[in-house]
């Protein structure tokens, strides 16, 4: 293996991997001579993401510990120990100049090994409130990069912290609305609602959307819907929408998310950090339905966007077709409010400059 300039630890989910991939591509654009290498997880998803990235890398068998049953805890600890030992020897072999992690259990194992082998480490936190792993790793890192001023306040060593935003794919910024509408076969004259529950779908959002479609049929609005259901609910949703007169595009998974954001006037979504970064990079207003649990991250993310006037929050316990209908219709008819929310969203997104800022920080270390 050639000596690596920048080693990136990211995996376990698209939310950890894709921001890191955006940074890797920007690094190659800014410094083509730099050797970038990935360490990612052992899941099938990790394998597919790494294979499609265009970068070299290895996969390690680290596993997440959140919500692990007591009986499987020793096995998980053993797997993470083996992954750590492998990373330790990889660090000596590759001697990276900088190790960059986007959090999660992959980042935790890799950055700990990097610190023990005297490698310089840089950590990125996308959520408003950092997770347990990132709070620990921040103590070892030379630089901590965060999504917002609110995130920065969660870290003690403020001299290490830089507010840069969350990296997103350049394609999200470049997509042209007219071309995206043609590719998705949607009407340029209609208000477009994009509804999604993340890459795995969200049954409660799908159920609420079906109720929304029944309710909206009796309202005088010019509307079309792009809905990502996830694979599990896809056929059920398609069958349930057969009699709907609304123009709809229903997909189990949207491969080309830049097109989806490109056609949207309003987004209904969960409040994961990457979804929020993409929404704000594009300057879109949103109705956010945070997923309960997961350390409360999504609730805090959604509250942050609502506080800044870029979104409305609809708690899961209040989610229904009629509640969703009232919010959507109110926003369609309240054009001034919708435009103000879009402006605030764009301000929070920083015009999608986070990828450039993160890459520049890595090249400075």
Image: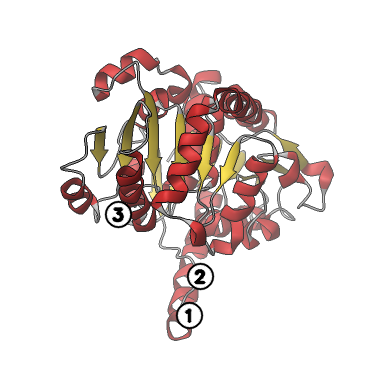
Neighbour class for label 2 at 10 Å: few (<14), some, many (≥20)? Answer: some
- Tell me the SS state at disc 3: helix
**Quadrant of the image for the C terminus?**
top right
Q: Residue at x 64, y 42 (%)?
A: 306
Q: Identify the residue under disc 3.
A: 44
295 or 27, which is in the foreground? 295
CB atoms of marks 2 and 1 within 8 Å: yes
According to the image, label 2 marks what residue?
Answer: 65
Relative to 316, residue 120 above or below: above
**Residue depicted at x 25% and y 39%:** 250
Distance of label 2 from label 1 (alpha carbons): 8 Å
Residue 127 visible from this viewpoint:
no
Residue 96 is situated, as x and y percent measured from the top left of the image, at 57, 41
Task: Kindly identify which residue carries mark 1.
Answer: 73
Tally of marks: 3
Instruction: Decide if residue 64 is on the left or right side of residue 210.
Output: right
| Lower sequence index among marks 3 and 2 | 3
Pointer 3 with pointer 2, Cβ within 8 A: no
- Quarter of the image that includes the N terminus: top left
């Amino acid at each position: 293996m050639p000596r690596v300039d920048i080693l990136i630890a990211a995996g376990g989910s698209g939310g950890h991997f894709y921001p890191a991939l955006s940074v890797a591509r920007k690094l190659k654009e800014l410094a083509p001579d730099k050797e970038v290498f990935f360490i990612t997880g052992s899941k099938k998803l990790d394998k597919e993401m790494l294979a499609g990235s265009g970068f070299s890398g290895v996969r390690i068998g680290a596993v997440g510990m959140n919500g692990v049953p007591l009986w499987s805890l020793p096995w998980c600890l053993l797997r993470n120990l083996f992954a750590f030992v492998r990373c330790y020897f990889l660090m000596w072999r590759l001697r990276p100049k900088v190790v960059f992690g986007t959090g999660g259990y992959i980042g935790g194992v890799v950055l700990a090994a990097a610190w023990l082998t005297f490698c310089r480490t840089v950590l990125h936190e996308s959520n408003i409130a950092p997770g347990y792993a990132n709070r620990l790793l921040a103590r070892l890192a030379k630089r901590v990069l965060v999504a917002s001023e609110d995130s920065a306040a969660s870290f003690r060593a403020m001299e290490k912290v830089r507010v840069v935003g969350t990296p997103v794919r350049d394609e999200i910024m470049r997509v042209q609305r007219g071309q995206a509408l043609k590719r998705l076969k949607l009407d340029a004259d209609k208000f477009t609602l994009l509804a999604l529950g993340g890459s795995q779908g969200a049954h409660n959002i799908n159920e609420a959307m079906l109720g929304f479609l029944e309710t909206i049929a009796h309202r005088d609005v010019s509307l079309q819907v792009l809905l990502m259901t996830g694979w599990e609910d896809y056929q059920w949703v398609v069958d349930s929408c057969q009699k709907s007169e609304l123009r709809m595009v229903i997909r189990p998974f949207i491969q080309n998310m830049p097109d989806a954001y490109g056609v949207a006037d309003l987004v209904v979504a969960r409040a994961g950090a990457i979804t929020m970064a993409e929404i704000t990079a594009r300057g879109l207003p949103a109705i956010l339905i945070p997923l309960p649990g997961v350390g409360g991250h999504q609730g805090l993310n959604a509250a942050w966007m609502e506080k800044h006037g870029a979104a409305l929050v609809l708690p899961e316990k209040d989610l229904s077709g009629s509640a969703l209908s009232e919010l959507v219709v109110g926003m369609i008819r309240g054009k001034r409010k919708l435009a103000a929310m879009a402006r605030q969203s764009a301000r929070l997104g920083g015009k999608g400059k986070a990828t450039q800022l993160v890459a520049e920080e890595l090249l400075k270390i």
